[in-house]
Image (tube, rainbow, N blue to C red):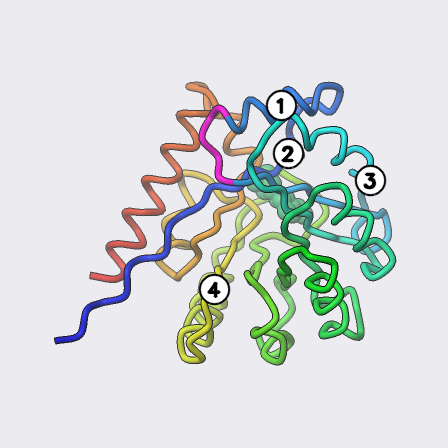
């Protein structure tokens, strides 16, 4: 008798875009106290996306405030130039956008050579075929559920078939790789993403706008995701 594979744990990964930037260390601690599993830094260069955010020094200054892993989502035009800085700043996972480098395989290899775990992100318009050749190099595939650049945008539900396509391809190849969703994810949208196969859930605005606070928002989104995942697999 064969046993069903155990379900992939759901991780809640806050984006700090809605946090108070004048006190980021304390904001990171509040997220850790609220039960998040890691923290995502949305790195934007004003070129790949029309917004500008966190340099490595900002992230490094927060590293000692918490022990949860940091991931850097590099929404930048030339990620190779910046990889070392973000790894040295204490980012355990570095995510490169497939659209941002013409040598994606090389970029991801550099991340792992630097000692970090690699992730690859897909903009809504980018097909899964763009990352098929690098799936064995990464720890996670990030399916963007908004066009990157800003927090607080509306979730794009037509990304759910793409999440399912990535999950099926990874399973077919027997790869132990997580699938992350990012953008407009909250209590009302997380079920669709988790049922499609996402297990790393990035949430920004939804966490900060919960009137009952961060810990409630984290637990609520986690339990909705777990219920949807379990409903989809039974
Ligand atoms: O990558 C991002 C934007 O490019 C952010 O991580 C994302 O938008 C999270 O914020 P929200 O949950 O408010 O949509
Ligand atoms: Co993000």
Q: Return the x and y of residue 68 as percentages of the image width and height.
A: 55, 36
Ligand 1 is within 8 Å of the C-beta of the residue at disc 1: no
Q: Residues within 10 Å of mark 1 (few under 14, many from 20)?
A: some
Label 4 or label 3, whichever comes before in sequence order? 3
Left/right placement of residue 68 relative to residue 25 reads left
Left/right placement of residue 102 relative to residue 158 reads right
Label 3, on which residue? 55
The overriding secondary structure of the stretch rendered in magenta is loop
Is residue 34 shown in magenta?
Answer: yes
Along the line of sight, which residue is nearer the eye, 90 or 119?
A: 90
Label 4, on which residue? 163
Picture quadrant where residue 133 is located: bottom right
Along the line of sight, which residue is nearer the eye, 98 or 8?
A: 8
> What element does badge 4 sit on?
helix
Q: CA distance from mark 2 to mark 3?
A: 14 Å
Label 1, on which residue? 27
Residue bounds of the magenta highlight: 33-37
Q: Is residue 125 above or below residue 67?
A: below
Q: CA distance from mark 3 to mark 1?
A: 17 Å
Tell me if label 1 and label 2 are in contact, CB under 8 Å.
yes
Label 3 or label 1, whichever comes before in sequence order? 1
Q: Residue at x 61, y 71 (%)?
A: 137
Label 1 or label 2, whichever comes before in sequence order? 2
Q: Return the x and y of residue 141 as percentages of the image width and height.
A: 56, 63
Label 2, on which residue? 16
Q: Nearer the viewer, mark 4 or mark 3?
A: 3
Q: Residue at x 65, y 39 (%)?
A: 151
Left/right placement of residue 132 relative to residue 168 reads right
Q: Is residue 122 above or below residue 189?
A: below
Label 1 or label 4, whichever comes before in sequence order? 1
Is residue 112 shown in magenta?
Answer: no
């Amino acid at each position: 008798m064969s046993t069903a594979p155990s379900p992939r744990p759901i991780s809640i990964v806050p984006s700090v875009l809605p946090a108070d930037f004048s006190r980021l260390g304390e904001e990171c601690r509040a997220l850790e106290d609220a039960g998040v599993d890691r923290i995502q830094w949305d790195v934007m260069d004003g070129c790949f996306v029309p917004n500008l955010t966190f340099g490595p020094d900002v992230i490094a200054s927060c590293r000692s405030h918490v022990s949860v892993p940091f991931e850097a989502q590099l929404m930048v035009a030339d990620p190779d130039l910046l990889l070392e800085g973000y790894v040295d700043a204490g980012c355990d996972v570095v995510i490169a956008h497939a659209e941002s480098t013409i040598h994606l395989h090389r970029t991801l290899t550099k991340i792992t050579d630097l000692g970090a775990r690699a992730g690859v992100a897909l903009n809504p318009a980018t097909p899964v075929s763009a990352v098929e050749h690098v799936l064995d190099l990464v720890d996670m595939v990030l399916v963007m559920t908004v066009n990157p650049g800003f927090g607080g945008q509306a979730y794009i539900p037509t990304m759910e078939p793409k999440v399912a396509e990535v999950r099926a391809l990874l399973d077919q190849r027997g790869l132990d790789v997580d699938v992350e969703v990012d953008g407009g994810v909250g209590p009302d949208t997380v079920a669709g993403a988790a049922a499609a196969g996402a297990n790393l859930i990035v949430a920004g605005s939804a966490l900060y706008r919960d009137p009952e606070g961060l810990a409630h928002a984290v637990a609520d989104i986690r339990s909705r995701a777990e219920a949807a995942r379990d409903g989809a697999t039974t």
